[in-house]
């Protein structure tokens, strides 16, 4: 298990889903990055930071929305350690991006050694094992040979394939039950047993919650991170988790503005 030593106040946010059509979410995220740079000891972004990431080479010709996000991440990484995790939308993020930002790539999963204790962090899509169609997709796109082939294609072709994939996914999701698109309880239990941790943090499902479980007679906690949408959702959605010596606590964007 890959361990990451994280003393102090660790801020964690995922599922920001930044893209060309999310100006309000981008603005909220840039404000969050500034606050984290001032108040956090480290910032972890475990996946789906971007709505669709087609390869790190896009940073060489970043459109304005992306250039602003990259600058915000770079500024934060200049102040505190910033860790980038890969989700099902941005699994193609790699070392070129991390290096350009001065950030680090999160192992998957990552065992965080915090002042609260050990916390396991992952994006969470791998726990949705009832969704066989997705797990097949995931196996394909996580294959290094597939990734090399895809990244070898011109950017316009990759953009087109990403749009096709987004369309197919949205259509497929219409036909799926909510249960299938959530984590599988046996997969969660297996992860707790394999790692022996008491606390698991993940995103992906967009169902923010603190779940208390009993596994093998021991209390465990599963914390699900909120997704961000300040452009279409009313009220605007977004938030983060803070882990420090006092424990774990959710923070909501709406409350931060008060
Ligand atoms: O993403 P979301 O929220 O809609 O649903 C996810 C699962 N779907 C995905 C697929 C992504 O949305 C695809 C876009 C990725 C963009 C960047 C990558 C670069 C392009 C890659 C080109 C292939 O993650 C969805 C789950 C849901 O979460 C809940 O967990 O149910 O899973 C599916 O819908 C699986 C579908 O059955 C198939 C997914 C799309 C298949 C596209 C094949 C395109 C062929 C290209 C071959 C080169
Ligand atoms: Mn996701």
Image (cartoon, rainbow, N blue to C red):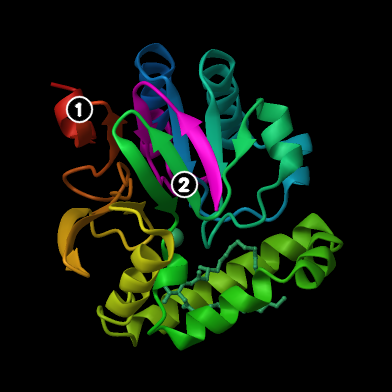
Residue identified by numbered label 2: 111
Q: Give the left or right position of residue 113, taking residue 104 as reference.
A: left
Where residue 97 sits, quadrant-wise, is top right
Q: Is residue 248 magenta?
A: no
Q: In the depicted view, which residue is nearer to us: 8 or 21?
A: 8
SS for dot 1:
loop
User: x, y (%) of residue 215?
Assistant: 22, 68
Residue 15 visible in the current orientation: no
Q: In the depicted view, which residue is nearer to us: 252 or 127?
A: 127
User: x, y (%) of residue 258?
Assistant: 13, 21
In the image, is the residue at mark 2 within 8 Å of ligand 2 by its beta carbon?
no
Q: Is residue 72 above or below residue 104?
A: above
User: x, y (%) of residue 146?
Assistant: 77, 72
Q: Give the left or right position of residue 101, taking residue 49 as reference.
A: right
Mark 1 touching mark 2, by CB under 8 A?
A: no
User: x, y (%) of residue 130?
Assistant: 38, 85
Q: Is residue 252 above or below residue 123?
A: above
Label 2, residues with CA under 10 Å away: few <14, some 14-19, many ≥20: many
What is the CA distance from the residue labelled 1 to the residue labelled 2? 18 Å
Write the residue at 41% across / 62% down.
Answer: 124
SS for dot 2:
strand
In the rendered structure, find residue 246 and report the number of the disc placed on it. 1
Residue 170 visible in the current orientation: yes
Q: Earlier in the sequence, mark 1 or mark 2?
A: 2
In the rendered structure, find residue 9 and report the number of the disc placed on it. none
Q: In the depicted view, which residue is nearer to us: 52 or 206?
A: 206
Write the residue at 21% across / 34% down.
Answer: 247
Q: Which residues are magenta?
A: 1-27
Q: Is residue 14 magenta?
A: yes
Where residue 161 sits, quadrant-wise, is bottom right
């Amino acid at each position: 298990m890959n361990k990451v030593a994280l003393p102090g106040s660790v801020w964690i946010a995922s599922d920001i889903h930044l893209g060309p059509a999310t100006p309000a979410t981008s603005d909220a995220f840039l404000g969050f990055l500034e606050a984290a740079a001032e108040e956090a000891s480290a910032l972890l972004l475990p996946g789906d930071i971007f709505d669709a990431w087609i390869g790190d080479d896009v940073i060489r010709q970043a459109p304005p929305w992306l250039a602003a996000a990259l600058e915000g991440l770079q500024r934060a990484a200049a102040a505190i350690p910033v860790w980038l995790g890969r989700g099902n939308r941005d699994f193609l993020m790699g070392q070129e991006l991390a290096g350009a930002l001065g950030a680090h790539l999160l192992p998957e999963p990552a065992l965080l050694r915090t002042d609260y204790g050990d916390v396991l962090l992952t994006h969470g899509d791998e726990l949705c094992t009832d969704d066989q169609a997705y797990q097949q997709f995931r196996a394909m796109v996580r294959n290094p040979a597939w990734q090399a082939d895809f990244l070898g294609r011109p950017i316009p072709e990759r953009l087109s394939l990403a749009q096709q994939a987004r369309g197919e996914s949205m259509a497929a999701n219409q036909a799926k039950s909510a249960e299938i698109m959530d984590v599988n309880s046996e997969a969660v239990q297996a992860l707790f047993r394999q790692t022996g941790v008491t606390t698991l943090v993940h995103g992906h499902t967009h169902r923010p919650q603190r779940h208390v479980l009993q596994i093998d007679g021991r209390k465990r906690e599963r914390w699900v991170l909120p997704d961000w949408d300040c452009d279409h959702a009313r009220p605007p959605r977004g938030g983060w988790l803070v882990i420090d010596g006092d424990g774990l606590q959710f923070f909501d964007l709406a409350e931060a503005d008060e």
